[in-house]
């Protein structure tokens, strides 16, 4: 089970999917620019802002899982 999860995470990290995360208003304004450098910057900023909630939720889930695991070991 742990090997399988490790391989899944490894594959997801090695083969990232390129996404464009913009609202329709930002996209409409940024498409009018000829060089598209601002659009790439906005996309990168949105993606960086999306990472932190997932990291926080993953940390909370890990600590909850660890607490349940400790309580199971102490009751056995």
Image (cartoon, helix red, strand yellow):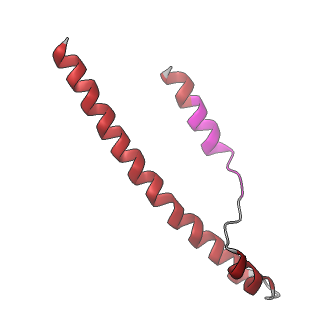
| Residue that appears at 64% across and 37% down | 11
Rendered image quadrant of residue 64: top left
**Is residue 56 left or right of 21 when viewed as pictured?**
left
| Residue that appears at 76% across and 82% down | 28
x, y percentage for residue 32?
A: 81, 88
x, y percentage for residue 34?
A: 83, 87
x, y percentage for residue 72?
A: 24, 19
Q: How many marks?
A: 0
Rendered image quadrant of residue 18: bottom right
Residue farthest top in this picture: 76
Query: Quadrant location of the C terminus?
Result: top left
Q: Is residue 26 positioned above or below 70 on the image?
A: below
| Residue that appears at 58% across and 69% down | 46
Q: Main secondary structure of the magenta part?
A: helix
Q: Is residue 75 magenta?
A: no
| Residue that appears at 68% across and 83% down | 38
Rendered image quadrant of residue 19: bottom right
Q: Nearer the viewer, residue 14 or 74?
A: 74
What span is in magenta? 7-18
Residue farthest front in this picture: 24
Q: Nearer the viewer, residue 44 or 28?
A: 28
């Amino acid at each position: 089970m742990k090997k399988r999860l490790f391989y899944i995470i490894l594959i997801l990290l090695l083969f990232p999917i390129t996404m464009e995360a913009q609202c329709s208003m930002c996209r409409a304004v940024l498409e009018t620019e000829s060089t598209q450098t601002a659009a790439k910057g906005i996309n990168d900023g949105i993606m960086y802002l999306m990472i932190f909630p997932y990291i926080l939720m993953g940390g909370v889930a890990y600590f909850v899982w660890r607490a349940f695991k400790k309580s199971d070991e102490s009751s056995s």
